[in-house]
């Protein structure tokens, strides 16, 4: 089992920055592929960034968000810059085992609200 705990959400003005953290336990990050998803009210959950052979970013966040990992801390981060009101959502950290496509492990989510 993998446990994921997010932190770092909050309220920020448009143009501001936030850094989300996701601390993993139960398995080391080197055994996993990590993703950040978000879900806005009335919308489907979407993948915004993910680690892997090629780092993935959704078109809507390219150039503004950066996913990174600290293996020593077993933590994955999502640095979010130049935030826009449309980035407002609950952000979830998720993990999948290498070789599998489905994200099996999820954090509880953290709210990000960007005011205009």
Image (tube, rainbow, N blue to C red):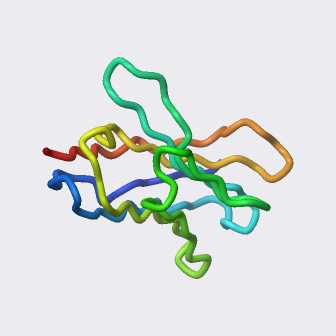
**65 left or right of 67 in image:** left
* Location of residue 100 with respect to 40 vertically, above or below: below
Residue 3 screen position, x and y as percent:
54, 51
Task: Indicate the quadrant where residue 83 lies.
Answer: bottom left
Q: Residue furthest right?
A: 99
* Location of residue 31 with respect to 95 vertically, above or below: below
Q: Residue at x 73, y 68 (%)?
A: 30
**108 left or right of 25 in image:** left
Residue 23 screen position, x and y as percent:
48, 63
Residue 58 screen position, x and y as percent:
56, 45
* Location of residue 115 with respect to 74 vertically, above or below: above
- Observer-nearest of 59 and 108: 59
Q: Residue at x 40, y 54 (%)?
A: 6
- Observer-nearest of 63 and 102: 63
Q: Residue furthest bottom?
A: 72
* Tally of marks: 0
Q: Residue at x 31, y 24 (%)?
A: 41
**55 left or right of 92 in image:** right
Residue 38 screen position, x and y as percent:
44, 39
Q: Residue at x 50, y 49 (%)?
A: 93
Q: Residue furthest top?
A: 42
Q: Quadrant of the C terminus?
A: top left
* Location of residue 76 with respect to 40 vertically, above or below: below
């Amino acid at each position: 089992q993998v446990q994921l705990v997010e932190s770092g959400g909050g309220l920020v003005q448009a143009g501001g920055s936030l850094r989300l953290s996701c601390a993993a336990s139960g398995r080391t990050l080197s055994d996993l592929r990590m993703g950040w998803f978000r879900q806005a009210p009335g919308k489907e959950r979407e993948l915004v960034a993910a680690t892997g052979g090629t780092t993935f970013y959704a078109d809507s966040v390219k150039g503004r968000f950066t996913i990174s990992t600290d293996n020593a801390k077993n933590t994955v981060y999502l640095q979010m810059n130049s935030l826009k009101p449309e980035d407002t959502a609950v952000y979830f950290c998720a993990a999948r085992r290498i070789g599998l496509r489905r994200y099996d492990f999820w954090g509880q989510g953290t709210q990000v609200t960007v005011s205009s």
